[in-house]
Amino acid sequence: MIGPYSDFALASKELKKVKKLATFEQAFIRQVVKTSAQQPVMKAKPTTAAVAPAANTAVSEASAPKPASKPKSEEKSAPTVVPAAAPTKPVAKLSSTPKPSGNSGFVLRQQVKVGSQTFAVPYSDNPKVQFYMEHDQAWNRLDYDAAQIVCRDLGMRLATEQEWSALLKSKQMQQHQWPVQLPYWGEGRKGMFTTGKINVLKGSSLLNVVCVK
C-alpha cells in the first residue's frame, strides 16, 4: 500500500507510474472517507467521491497473490505387464570326457594279436569326447576312470605293465600306425609310454587308451 494521498489527481498520476512495474500491474486507488459518529453515513456518489477534497486516497497494490495454477497431473501410463521369466533349467556340468556306458558309441578301431591276447584301441566319434590328430586320423583322449569304463563296456580291461611290454616288443603298433605321441593308460593309473617308460599319473590326465582281453 502506497499513500495516503490527499490529492486524487496526484494519486492517479502515481498510480500510472506504479502500474508500469511488472509486479504492480493490478494496483488500484482506494478511497477512504472519514465520518463522524454523530452524523449518519451518507452514500457518496461515485463522481463526487472522486473529487472530494477532504478525502484521503491511497494507491494499493493487489496484495493477494495470484492463485498458483495447478500443475497438470502427470498422465498415468498404462501399467506394463512384464511376463514372468521362465525358470532357468540347471545346466548339467560335463566332465572333460563323458562317462561311457554300454551304448556309448565306442568301437574297436585297431586290433592286434600278441600271443593269446588281443589288444585294441577304442574310438568314438561323439563330439563331446576329446580327441587329437595323428597319422591323419582322430584318436580319443580319456581320463583314467573313463578309460576303465570304456574297456569294461567292450568286454575288455586296461593292460598291465607286462602286457604292455609284450605289445611293444611285437612292433605291431608301428606297423599298424597306432598313435604314439601320448602315453596309454594302464592298470593302476599308470601312464605307459612307447619308450617303455611307465609312471603313475593323475587320473585326470587325458591319455590314449588300449584295451586287452
Image (cartoon, grey):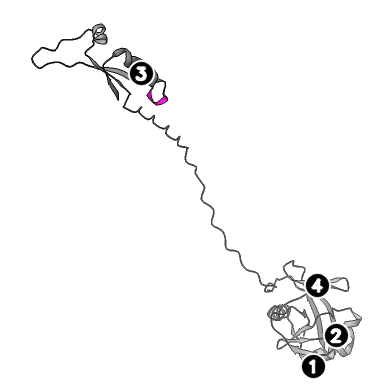
Which quadrant of the view contains residue 9? top left
Residue 27 - label: none
Residue drawn at (34%, 28%) of the image? 65
Q: Which residue is mark 1?
A: 162
Residue 127 lies, in percent from the top left, at 74, 66
Of the image marks 3 and 4, the number of the one nearer the N terminus: 3
Query: Is 126 covered by the magenta stretch?
Result: no
Residue type for callout 1: Gln
The mark closer to the camera, 3 or 4, is 3
Whether residue 151 is situated above or below residue 8 in the rendered picture: below
Residue pointed to by mark 4: 132
What residue range appears in magenta?
A: 22-27
Residue 41 lies left or right of residue 157; in this view the side is left
Q: CA distance from mark 1 to mark 2?
A: 15 Å
- The crowding category of the residue bearing disc 4, from other C-alpha atoms within 10 Å (few below 14, some 14 to 19, many at least 20), is some
Count of numbered labels shown in the rendering: 4
**Disc 3 element:** helix
